Amino acid sequence: LFLVERLKRALVRDDGALFLTYQPKLDLARGRIDRVEALVRWVDDEHGFISPDEFVPLAEQSGLIIKLTRWVVRSVLRQLALWNASGLHLGVAINVSAQDICHEQFIDSLLHELRESGVRHEQVTLEITERDLMDNEALAVEQLTALKAAGFRIAVDDYGVGYSSLSKLKQLPVDELKIDKSFILQLPESEQDQNIVSSTIELGHKLGLKVVAEGVETSAGLDLLRAMRCDSVQGYHLARPMSAEDLTQWYASYA
Ligand code: G
Ligand code: G
Ligand code: MN
Ligand code: NA
């Protein structure tokens, strides 16, 4: 079978070949883990582990992304409902593509899943890459405006590698900039990255946005970002993406 057919089968069967991992984000001002990013994983019984860098683009090309994202949303919200019930109140970031948000049923199905799970809108951040936004500008902006009006948080993912102009940024209905990890990974060693990141944080703040750094791998990087007044950090220095069970345990020992 072609890979995309195998992916479709994994979605239909929902027998554990597709699963979610969660990576925590630290709110620097409050010193608290307040959110997690959901990251999908696939272990195919024939091909083994397949990276989302490989199968997400495949799903996008074939249109299967709509079903994949629906599965992700449903699974994430179920998990969030479990955490809510156990007294663990976390927000979650879900990666979506322009195809998803431009799909006519996206908002309705999201709202339906929220009602089913009892999760609150403010608990959900939708991450969309800067590049995806720029490639689908008019309709994407319209849809994001509707999503934001419905109460969801919107983040621009992989910010800094997608060539959006400052005037575009001003018009986008977003709450958060997520600086791409390529500017963060060598932050302690690279003066150039330090300049780029500190000015991006300043710009974000002047536009009224929260700024998140991903790919924080060292305490030196974390210290720099704190000094730059970055709002939130995510990266291996804190924790790797992990299963829901592991995240629950990790959180208990961290907090
Ligand atoms: O851990 P990392 O390898 O998870 O993810 C690689 C890429 O795959 C990232 O760009 C990430 O945004 C994307 N990705 C991970 N999970 C999802 C998902 O559930 N949906 C979408 N659309 N992209 C995802
Ligand atoms: O959706 P996004 O492109 O933000 O996905 C985040 C990606 O970054 C995922 O592939 C995740 O596994 C990865 N990631 C998260 N933290 C780190 C880190 O500290 N270092 C590196 N190299 N990758 C990370
Ligand atoms: Mn992301
Ligand atoms: Na990213």
Image (cartoon, grey):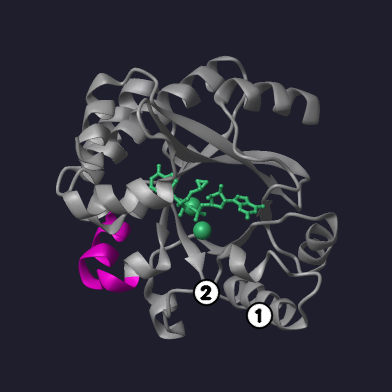
* Residue type, numbered disc 1: Ile
In the image, residue 205 sits, relative to residue 88, either above or below, namely below
Circle 1 residue: 196
**Residue beneath the point at 39% across and 57% down:** 128
Q: Is residue 78 above or below residue 3?
A: above
- Location of mark 2 (residue): 160
Exactly how many numbered labels are in the figure? 2
Residue type beneath disc 2 = Gly
Is 136 in the magenta?
A: yes
Mark nearer the N terminus (1 vs 2): 2
The percent position of residue 16, horizontal first and vertical second, equals 39, 20
Q: Main secondary structure of the magenta part?
A: helix
Query: What percent of the width, then of the height, locates residue 46?
Result: 35, 29
Q: Is mark 1 within 8 Å of ligand 4?
A: no
Estimate the x, y position of residue 123 in percent, counting from the top left: 49, 38
User: Quadrant location of the N terminus?
Assistant: top left
Asked whether the beta carbons under mark 1 and mark 2 sit within 8 Å of each other, the answer is yes
Magenta stretch contains residue 137: yes
Q: Secondary structure at mark 2?
A: loop
Q: Is residue 152 visible?
A: no
Instruction: Please name the residue shown 56% across and 27% down the image.
Output: 243
Horizontal arrangement in the rendering, residue 195 relative to residue 138 (left or right)? right
Find residue 145 and report its horizontal and vertical position in percent: 31, 60
Q: Residue 168's mark?
A: none
| Horizontal side of residue 135 vs 160, given as left or right | left
- Residue 113 placement: quadrant: top left
**From what the image shows, is residue 13 above or below residue 56?**
above
Regarding residue 127, the answer to whether it shows in the image is yes
Does 77 appear above or below 181?
above
Q: Residue at the location (38% across, 25% down)?
A: 17
Q: Which residues are magenta?
A: 134-146
Asked whether, in this view, residue 3 is left or right of residue 239, the answer is: left
